[in-house]
Image: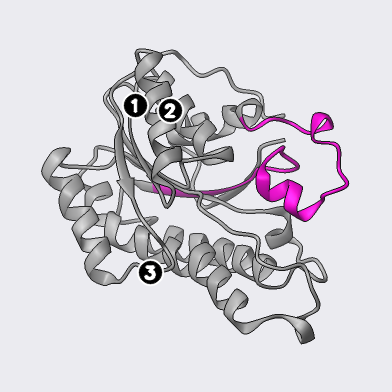
Amino acid sequence: MFDYQAPANLLKEKIILVSGAGSGIGKAAALAYAQHGATVILMGRNVQRLEQVYDEIEQAGYPKAAITPFDFLEAKDERYQELVNSIHSEFGKLDGLLNNASILGALTPIQSYNLTTWNQVIQTNLNAQFALTKYCLPLLQEADTASIIFTSSGAGRKPYAYWGAYSVSKAATEALAQVLFLELENTSKIRVNTINPGATATKMRSQAFPAENPEKLSKPEEIMALYLYLMGEDSQQENGKQFDAQ
């Protein structure tokens, strides 16, 4: 497990956008960021889940969150621009972006892979991450320093047979992060890193490994040390790197 103890005020007055914030790792990250002082913009497709996370943040007495319902499968350029305009109007900047929303798709040979499912996975896991990052860059550049984190996967670092579009999308996410890092390295205060969460008890993990005992896996909230570290000021020197949460 990544060893880091985050100061209580690590993210005080920071504005952080979290995609896939309604459940799993995204929810855990949103709660962790709020606990450490951030105003979190909760982004996801399921409004009810986002509202539940919003309520948890409010009940805990953390800074008031914001909710942004968003469907990555349907969104066009105009929707991303509307999102950015709304954030700019309300907050004026972004200090952090956690690209976390993903879907698993099918675990099947390439020869049998359904084209519609393939396109949905690539759209959600890669194209949407690109678009969200692209449109948020001006907001991130308004911050004194900013952090972009992509949630990757072991299946992206070392592709697995039968993991199809998911493995391909995560490998491409690693490449996207590297391209962005190289472009921003000498001209921006924005750092870009990727996190492989490892075996974590999430709904997606149970879909991929239905026979696995989730009690033997780390819970999402137990791997948040790295997500906090890379989002806060203590990680200023970390840029263009691949990290493992456990």
Instruction: Identify the mark at residue 33; answer none if there is no mark.
Output: 2
Separation of marks 2 and 1 at Cα, in angstroms: 5 Å
Residue 200 lies in the magenta-colored region: yes
Residues in magenta, as a range: 191-220
Separation of marks 1 and 3 at Cα, in angstroms: 29 Å
10 relative position to 88: left or right: right
Q: Residue furthest left?
A: 89
SS at circle 3: loop
Residue 221 lies in the magenta-colored region: no
Mark toward the viewer: 1 or 3: 3
Quadrant of the rendered image containing residue 64: top left
Closer to the N terminus: mark 1 or mark 3?
A: 1
Which residue does the image show at 43% across and 22% down from the upper left?
Answer: 56
Task: State the image coordinates of residue 214 (x, y, percent, origin top left).
Answer: 79, 35
Task: State the image coordinates of residue 101 (x, y, percent, origin top left).
Answer: 50, 52
Closer to the N terminus: mark 2 or mark 3?
A: 2
Closer to the N terminus: mark 2 or mark 1?
A: 2
Q: Mark 3 points at which residue?
A: 74
What amino acid type is highlighted by mark number 3? Glu
Disc 2 + disc 3, Cβ < 8 Å = no
Q: Mark 1 points at which residue?
A: 38
Task: State the image coordinates of residue 39 (x, y, percent, origin top left).
Answer: 30, 29
Which residue does the image show at 38% across and 24% down from the upper left?
Answer: 55
Above or below, 240 against 146 in this view is below
Quadrant of the image for the C terminus?
A: top right
Quadrant of the image for the N terminus?
A: top right
Residue 212 in view here? yes
What amino acid type is highlighted by mark number 2? Tyr
Crowd band around label 2 with a 10 angstrom C-alpha radius: few (<14), some (14–19), many (20+)? many
Which residue does the image show at 79% across and 33% down from the upper left?
Answer: 217
